[in-house]
Image (cartoon, rainbow, N blue to C red):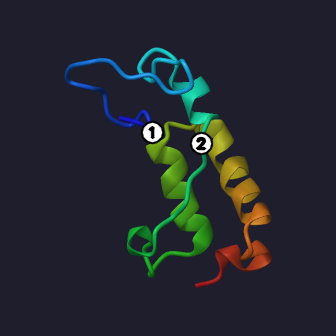
Amino acid sequence: MLTTLLRPTSGALEIDGLDPVSHSHEVRKCFGIVFQDPSLDNDMTAFENMSCTVVFYHVPRKLRASASSSCSACSSCGSGARTR
């Protein structure tokens, strides 16, 4: 619910004064993603792992490749992002 991937079934929730259900894009700007080792697929490249993440966060299809590339450029893997 905090990451806007799940809707609350009851109650109320605010993140930085915003309702994650009605303001999901604004709420997502309030926090970052930290991959945990178990959540990474070792059979995929870093770029492929990040590409899955942008799908989970409903990034529009036309922006997905650039979003994943931007993450690669900002991470320590850089040009190795597409290497297994």
Secondary element under disc 2, as helix, strand or loop, is loop
Horizontal arrangement in the rendering, residue 72 relative to residue 58 (left or right): right
Quadrant in the rendering for residue 10: top left
User: In the figure, 37 relative to 5: above or below?
Assistant: below
Q: Are marks 1 and 2 in contact (CB under 8 Å)?
A: yes
Quadrant placement of the N terminus: top left
Residue under circle 2? 31
x and y percentages locating residue 56 in the rendered image: 44, 45
- The residue lying at 51 percent from left, 25 percent from top is 24
Q: Residue 6 versus residue 47: which sits nearer the camera?
A: 6
Of the numbered discs in the image, which one, if any, rests on residue 3? 1
Tell me residue 28's x, y (percent): 57, 34
Residue at 54 percent of width and 18 percent of height: 17
Alpha-carbon neighbours of circle 2 within 10 Å: few (<14), some, or many (≥20)?
few
The furthest residue to the left: 9
Q: Tell me the quarter of the picture where residue 80 sits.
A: bottom right
Residue 8 at x, y = what percent?
Answer: 27, 26
